[in-house]
Amino acid sequence: MRYHSLVLAVILLFATLSTGIASLVSSARVADAYILWSPNETCVYPSSTITWKNVSLTSQHLTDTRIAIAFWNDIGANFFLDATTGTGNINYYSVDRSDVDWAGLGAPPGNCSGGVYSGSGSATLNSYYLGSNRDLIQATAGHETGHALGLEHTQSALQGASGRELMWPIVGTSIIAPTLDDIRAVQTKYGTRTSTSQCNEWNTNGDVTYTGTCSGTNPALPMTEKVTTSASNSKAVATTSSSTTSLPSNGAFVMTAIVKANTVNKFIMGAFTNTDISNTLNRFMAIEMSSDGFYLMSSSGSGYVRTQIHSSAPTVGQEYFLELVIRDGQSSRGYVFKNNGSATDPPDSVGSVATNTAAMAWSTSVYYGSGVWQTSAAQPKPDYTISKYYNLLRSYT
Amino acid sequence: MKTVVILVSAIGALTTALAFSGGFLQAPEKSLADQPKKESIHASYIGYTTFDNLIGNSTAIVAGETLGIKAVDDEGNIPTTDFDFRIDNVIQGNLKAGDIITIRQTGAETAEKIAELDDNPLLRKGETVLGFLRYAEEHGVYVFVGGPQGRFEIQNGLVNSMDKVVPEAAWVPIKADNQTVAEFAKVVQSEARS
C-alpha cells in the first residue's frame, strides 16, 4: 500500500512539473525583431489618391488635422490625401478620454493582402492630453496620419539619435511636420512623385483637394516641382515658374531643399509677399544657410530677425536638408539635417529646431523661392536644388 | 521495487511528453487559419522624460501582480481591457498592500482578433509590474502614466523598463536595468522628496 501511494505521488509530481514547464514555454513572449519605419506594414492603399473623412473631429482638431494632412501631401511621396464626405480610406476621430494613456492613436486598415490595404485606417486625437495646444494637435494628427499610412515608430534612439522625427513615439511642439527620416520612410513605401502637372487647391471648405490641374482659383504650390537655379547676383531671389499661391486662413505648407555647403555663400529659401525682397513692405519667412550657421529668418518692421537653428558653420562639401514650415497665423519652424543616412541609419540632425514666434498672415499672395546672396558674382555658388516636394531617394545634379 | 521504479519513470516520461506536446493537458493547437488575427494599433504619447514628470503625474506608484482580465470592450475603434491587479508594495499613494485595483489598457484579445500596442502589450495573468499609475476617477480605473513610460516589469525580483521587454519600447526615456524593487523604490522616493 505504501508503494502504491508513493507511485501515485510521483506520477502526480511529474504531471504537475510537466504542465508547469510546458505552460511557461508556451507563454514566453517572443520579442519582435528590431523594426524601423514599416517592415511589418507591407501594404499601401489601392489608389495614390487616399481619401480621408472627418468622422467626429472637433472644430479645432479639424482645422489642425487639415494642416497636418497638407504637410504629408507636400513632401513628395506618391500619394495625395483628399478630403471626402463619402467612404474614407482613413477616418479621423476626436475623443476626450482620461481612461487611456495616449494622446493619439493610429492604425492602418486591418486587412493587408497582396501589397494592398482594404478597409479603412484610422487616426484618433485625445483632447484629454492635447488640450488646445495647436502645435501639439498638429503634431499628433500628423503622427497618427503617418500610422494610418502604414508607418511605424522610428527607433532612432537605438542609433543614438535623439528622435527628431514626426514618427517618434513622443509628440511635442517642436516637430510638427514630417522631417527627413519620415519623408524617406514614406517615399520608400509609396514611391516618389514624378509628375509636374498636378496641383493642390485649398477649396472653400479649407481642405486641400487634388485637382489634377493648376488652373483653379486658389492654386497652391504645384505638387511636384524641382527648381535648379544658378542665381548669382547679390540678393537675387529666383522664383519658380509658378511662384504664387494664396493660402486661406489657417493654411500651411512645407518647403524643402538640399544644399551642398560652400564657405562663401549664403543660401536662402522662403516665402515672401513681394518678389522684391528689399521692399520694406515685404513680409517673409525663410531658412538660411550661411558661413556662420543656420537660421530661421523673418521680417520684422523694415528689417528682419534671425533665430538660430545651429551655430556652427556648415561643413564644406556636405549636403544639408533644409525644411521650412510656413503656417498662416502661427509660428514657423526651421529644421536642418545632414543629408546622409539610409533606410536603417537615420540622418544626423543639425543643432536644434528653430521656432520663429512671428505669426504672419499669409492670406494674400505668397511667393516662394530661393536665392544665393553673394558679395561678388565671381565667387563660387553653392550647389543647390529646391523643391517643394523633394525626392529624397535620388540625387539631383 | 525495481519494477515500480521502472514503471514510475515510464509514466513520468510519458506524462512529460504529453504535456509538452499539448496532449491531454491542453487543447490541440489552432491551425493558422483559426488563430486570432493580429491588428496593429499605434499610439503617440506625451513625454515623461524625468522621474519628476512621472511622479508628478501619478496618483499611485505601486508594485503588484496581474490577477487576470476583468472586462474587455472591443466595440468601436478603441478596444480596451481592464485587469484586476493586486498591490504588493506601495511606493507612493494611498493604496495599501492587498488592495485590488483595476488597470485599463488599450487593446483587446478576442477569439477572432488581437489588437495590441506593440510598445505597451497587454498585461498577462501572473505578470508582476511596478507602475506609475494615474486614477481616472470618472471611470474608476488606473492607467499607466505615459503608457510604457510608466510601466516597469518585475522578473525574479528585479525591475526593468519596458525597453528590456519589447524592442518597440526602446524609446522610453526613464530606464531601469535589473534593479531590485527596494533600490528602485529608493530612487523614486528620493526623487519625490527633492
Image (cartoon, rainbow, N blue to C red):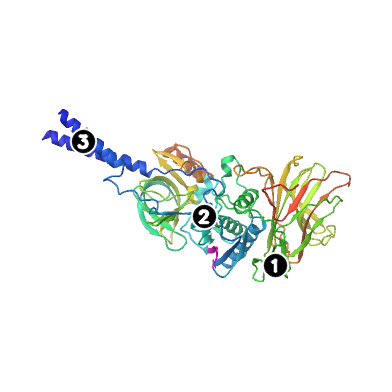
Q: Tell me the crowding category of disc 3: few under 14, some 14 to 19, or many 20 or more residues within 10 angstroms, Cα based.
A: some
* Marks 1 and 2, the one that precedes in the sequence: 2
Amino acid type at image mark 3: Val
- Across and down, in percent, residue A373 comes to 83, 49
Q: Is residue A53 above or below residue A308?
A: below
- Callout in the foreground (1, 2): 2
Q: Which amino acid does the dot numbered 1 rest on?
A: Pro
What range is drawn magenta here? A87-93
Image position, residue A27 (x, y; %): 37, 44
Q: Are marks 2 and 3 in contact (CB under 8 Å)?
A: no
Numbered tag placed on residue A114 in the rendering:
2
Q: Which image quadrant for residue B14?
A: top left
Q: Quadrant of residue A318?
A: top right
Q: Residues within 10 Å of mark 1 (few under 14, many from 20)?
A: some
Q: Which residue lies at the image location 51% right of the left edge and 41% below the top edge?
A: B175
Query: Neighbour class for label 2 at 10 Å: few (<14), some, many (≥20)?
Result: few
- Is there one chain holding both mark 1 and mark 2? yes
- Residue A248 marker: 1
Q: In x, y percent, where is residue A320?
A: 72, 45
Residue A10's mark?
Answer: 3
Give the residue type at disc 2: Gly
Q: Earlier in the sequence, mark 1 or mark 3?
A: 3
Residue A88 is a magenta residue = yes
